[in-house]
Image (cartoon, rainbow, N blue to C red):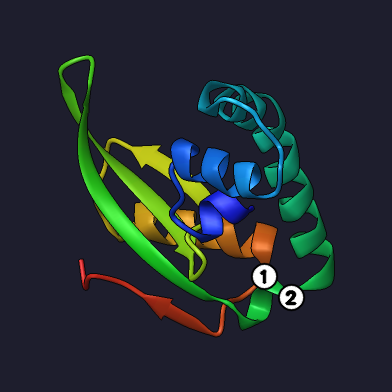
Amino acid sequence: MMYVRYPLSLRQVEDILFERRIDICHETVRLWWNRFGPMFAAEIRRRRVHHRSYSNWRWHLDEVFVRINGETHYLWRAVDHEGEVLEVFATKRRDRKAALTFIKRAMKRYGQPRVIVTDRL
């Protein structure tokens, strides 16, 4: 969590631990981060879901053009104000029906947000 919250490099973490008389290599910090980081992140997400209400969150809806097997597709994403990707939806069409399907799916899973921010597309 410290690594994500404060932009620390592996060598800075090594120096901080060395000041506390823990002598390790920055490579060891990297191995620990790769091994235990996903477990910590999953636990933080699990606790956040149970303790907070999604309805008070602000969502940012975004649309991106992507090529899949040479065909243009539209990738829709819903991201909360903390940067957590809530929902992703890929479709061949870019119309009102596809957008409403995406929003309905996200609201069914996470509840209604208080504010939705879009790029007006």
Is residue 113 visible in the rendered image? The answer is yes
Quarter of the image where one finds residue 96? bottom left
- Whole-angstrom CA distance, mark 1 to mark 2, is 9 Å
Foreground pick, 81 / 114: 81
Tell me: residue 57, above or below residue 5. Answer: below
Residue beneath label 2, please? Answer: 53
Image-based side of 48 in relation to 62, left or right:
right
Measuring from the top left, give residue 47's x and y in whole percent: 81, 59
In the rendered image, residue 14, in percent from the top left (x then y), is placed at 55, 38
Is the residue 68 above or below the residue 66 in the image? above
Image quadrant where residue 97 sits: bottom left
x and y, in percent, of residue 91 in the image:
34, 38
Residue density around tag 1, few if under 14, some if 14–19, many if 20 or more, within 10 Å: some
Residue type at numbered disc 2: Ser
Which residue is at a point 32% across and 43% down the rendered structure image? 75
Check disc 1 and give the amino acid type. Answer: Gly
Label 1 with label 2: CB-CB less than 8 Å:
yes
Image height of 75 relative to 4, above or below:
above
* Residue at numbered disc 1: 111
Asked whether 20 or 35 is in front, the reply is 20
Q: Is residue 69 left or right of residue 49?
A: left
Is disc 1 placed on a helix, strand or loop?
loop
